[in-house]
């Protein structure tokens, strides 16, 4: 694994990411309006300091809500941040080859994909096609909180973030640097109403 500059240690990377979200929330982004080819060219070689795995939801554009610019973070988005081999391999690449020390899993309130999983378990009707795969990957979180719980959707969103974090921490190539404290995998939640990102407490 390439050496990380001091400012790119997990704790510093997390502070930088959350500071970007505060700029976004305050309506004073540094990068938010500089979506120009000139800004893209100025990034030169990429030196990302974090990788964020989020949902495809159109209301949660990751670079925007963290006020990031070209070259600063890597972004992966799938329905309800569901993991598969391609996602895990991409994170392994970012950590192992680019020296990134922070992995954030970002869920969000009112997640439609998690809602689909709750609905599937309540009705017994599993969607067909590849959507069924996505629902299957979320289903364990719904089981754990109880599909019939009136608050199942909200609780499953949180549980699913924690499960995703746990899976990544145990990943073949991530487990050792995570255990050594060289890489952090954290879970967080995006509030659609306020734009704020809050870290999820550890279990
Ligand atoms: Zn979602």
Image (cartoon, rainbow, N blue to C red):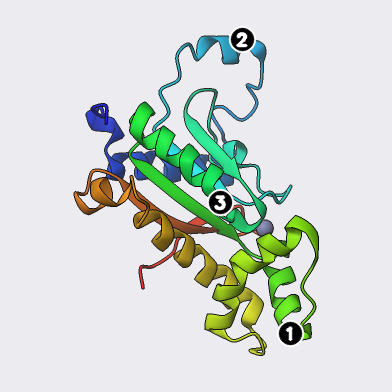
Of 64 and 165, nearer the camera is 165
Place of residue 125 in the rendered image (x, y in percent of width and height, measured from the top left): 80, 78
Q: Residue at x 50, y 44 (%)?
A: 52
> Could you tell me if residue 201 is visible in this image?
yes
Q: Residues within 10 Å of mark 3 (few under 14, many from 20)?
A: few
Q: Residues within 10 Å of mark 2 (few under 14, many from 20)?
A: few
Of 131 and 148, nearer the camera is 131
Place of residue 151 in the rendered image (x, y in percent of width and height, measured from the top left): 63, 83
Q: Which mark is residue 38?
A: 2
Of 124 and 67, nearer the camera is 124
Residue, disc 1: 122
Label 2 to label 3: alpha-carbon separation? 35 Å
Query: Quadrant location of ligand 1?
Result: bottom right
Residue 57 shown left or right of residue 74 in the figure: right
Residue, disc 3: 84
Front label number (2 vs 1): 1
Picture quarter containing residue 123?
Answer: bottom right
Picture quarter containing residue 36?
Answer: top right
Of 144 and 192, nearer the camera is 144
Q: Residues within 10 Å of mark 1 (few under 14, many from 20)?
A: some
Front label number (2 vs 3): 3
Label 2 to label 1: alpha-carbon separation? 50 Å
Q: Which mark is residue 157?
A: none
> Could you tell me if residue 26 is visible in this image?
no
State which tag comes first along the sequence, 2 or 1.
2
Q: Residue at x 45, y 14 (%)?
A: 45
């Amino acid at each position: 694994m390439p050496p990380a500059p001091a400012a790119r240690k997990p704790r510093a990377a997390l502070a930088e990411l959350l500071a970007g979200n505060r700029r976004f929330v305050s309506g004073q982004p540094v990068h938010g309006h500089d979506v120009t080819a000139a800004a893209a060219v100025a990034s030169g070689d990429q030196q990302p300091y974090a990788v964020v795995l989020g949902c495809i939801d159109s209301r949660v554009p990751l670079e925007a809500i963290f006020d990031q610019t070209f070259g600063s973070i890597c972004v992966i988005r799938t329905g309800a941040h569901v993991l598969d081999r391609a996602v895990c391999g991409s994170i392994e690449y970012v950590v192992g080859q680019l020296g990134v020390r922070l992995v954030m899993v970002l869920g969000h309130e009112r997640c439609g994909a998690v809602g689909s999983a709750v609905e599937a378990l309540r009705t017994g009707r599993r969607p067909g096609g590849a959507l069924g795969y996505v629902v299957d990957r979320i289903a364990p979180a719904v089981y754990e909180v109880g599909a019939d719980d009136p608050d199942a959707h909200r609780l499953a969103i949180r549980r699913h973030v924690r499960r995703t974090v746990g899976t990544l921490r145990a990943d073949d190539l991530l487990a050792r640097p995570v255990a050594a404290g060289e890489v952090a995998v954290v879970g967080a939640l995006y509030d659609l109403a306020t734009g704020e990102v809050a870290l999820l407490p550890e279990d």
